């Protein structure tokens, strides 16, 4: 049974642009946590992990094997290792920080948490605000909280990981092909429908790859060819970041397949996830 571990595929608004399972794929295997969230409601890694834990427990109780599929490393790390127990931010602190220009927040952060300021870009408003809110509200830095983890299931399950790291040239060609295929499947209409909802542009669903690029076309700010090229480039860049993360962040003993899998190699890979292997 397949369980989604992709931060975009959780939103029902992005069936095309997130490459959600097709009707044929849904008939071939049960899928969980795909398209369960409305785009107006952001889903954090911690919230996804709670959903995933419930699905995994239910699948195990039925004597079946859950197969987590997806490229959101933060989701998987949160599920396995848990999350820092940062307390809720004082609403007054949050309101004050959010009403202050990013430049001032960064200067304040640099004065009280120089290590966090050194790690962040001065114009990264969301991360600067988050780091400042945490220390002002709790009296501890975000880094200090992140040294503690709770809620992970790594000690309760036996993960059988499989990381795919195909040749970059092959991967990038697939990215371009997939985005073009999304256009054929109705990605423009999907973005048009999303735009009509007039959601906050900072929501994850509005920042998904392809939304901004196709919105530009729909607003008359670019041609469709330009929007497609921009979407393909954004996809390749994201794939590069994913590739780097999965190449280096997971434990060194997690199997990594570094070539495009032919049928023989696919069989070898699938041996890793057999329940009794």
Image (cartoon, rainbow, N blue to C red):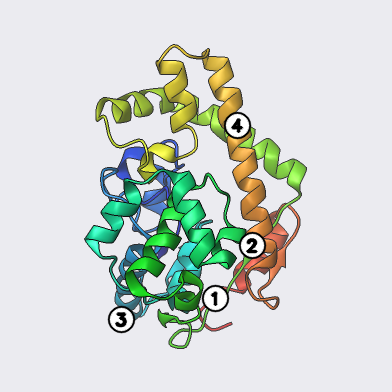
* Foreground: disc 4 or disc 1: 4
Q: Position of residue 19 (x, y in %)?
A: 46, 42
Dot 2 or dot 4: first in sequence order is 4
The answer for how far apart the CA atoms under marks 1 and 3 are is 17 Å
Give 126 or 215, whichever is nearer the viewer: 126
- The Cα–Cα distance between marks 1 and 2, rounded to whole angstroms, is 22 Å
Residue carrying label 4: 232
Element under label 1? loop
In primary-sequence order, the first of circles 1 and 3 is: 3
Q: Quadrant of the C terminus?
A: bottom right
> Reading the chain from its start, which is encountered first: label 2 or label 3?
3
Residue 159 at x, y percent in the picture:
53, 78
Q: CA distance from mark 2 to mark 3?
A: 30 Å
Q: CA distance from mark 2 to mark 4?
A: 21 Å
Residue drawn where x is 75% and y is 59% of the image: 258
Mark closest to the chain's N terminus, 3 or 4: 3
For label 1, count other residues whose C-alpha is less than 10 Å away and answer few (under 14), some (14-19) or many (20+). few
Disc marking residue 16: none
Dots 1 and 2: beta carbons under 8 Å?
no
Q: Residue at x 44, y 77 (%)?
A: 145
Q: Provide residue 93's location: percent of width, then percent of height.
A: 29, 60
In front: label 1 or label 2: 2
Mark 4 is surrounded, within 10 Å at the Cα level, by few (under 14), some (14 to 19) or many (20 or more) other residues, namely many
Q: Which mark is residue 274?
A: 1
Q: Which mark is residue 246?
A: 2
Name the residue beneath numbered marker 3. Answer: 61
Q: Is residue 135 left or right of residue 271?
A: left
Q: Earlier in the sequence, mark 1 or mark 2?
A: 2
Towards the viewer: 214 or 167: 214
In the displayed structure, would residue 32 be above or below residue 17?
A: below
């Amino acid at each position: 049974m397949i369980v989604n571990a992709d931060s975009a595929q959780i939103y029902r608004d992005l069936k095309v642009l997130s490459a959600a399972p097709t009707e044929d794929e849904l008939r071939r295997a049960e899928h969980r946590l795909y398209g369960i969230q409305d785009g107006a409601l952001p889903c954090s890694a911690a919230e996804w992990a709670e959903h995933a834990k419930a699905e995994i427990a239910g699948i195990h109780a039925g004597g079946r094997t859950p197969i987590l599929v997806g490229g959101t490393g933060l989701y998987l790390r949160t599920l396995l290792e848990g999350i820092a127990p940062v307390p809720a931010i004082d609403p007054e602190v949050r309101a004050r920080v959010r009403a202050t220009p990013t430049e001032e927040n960064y200067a304040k952060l640099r004065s009280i948490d120089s290590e966090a300021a050194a790690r962040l870009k001065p114009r990264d408003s969301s991360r600067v605000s988050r780091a400042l809110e945490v220390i002002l509200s709790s009296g501890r830095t975000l880094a200090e909280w992140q040294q503690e983890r709770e809620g992970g299931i790594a000690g309760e399950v036996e993960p059988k990981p499989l990381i795919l790291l195909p040749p970059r040239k092959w991967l990038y060609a697939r990215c371009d092909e997939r985005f073009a295929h999304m256009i054929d499947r109705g990605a423009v209409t999907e973005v048009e429908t999303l735009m009509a909802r007039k959601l906050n542009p900072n929501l994850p669903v509005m920042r998904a790859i392809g939304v901004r690029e196709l919105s530009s076309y729909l607003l008359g700010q670019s041609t469709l060819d330009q929007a497609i090229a921009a979407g393909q480039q954004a996809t390749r860049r994201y794939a590069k970041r994913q590739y780097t993360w999965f190449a280096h962040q997971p434990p060194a003993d997690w199997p990594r397949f570094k070539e495009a899998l032919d049928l023989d190699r696919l069989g070898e890979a699938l041996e890793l996830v057999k329940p009794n292997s």
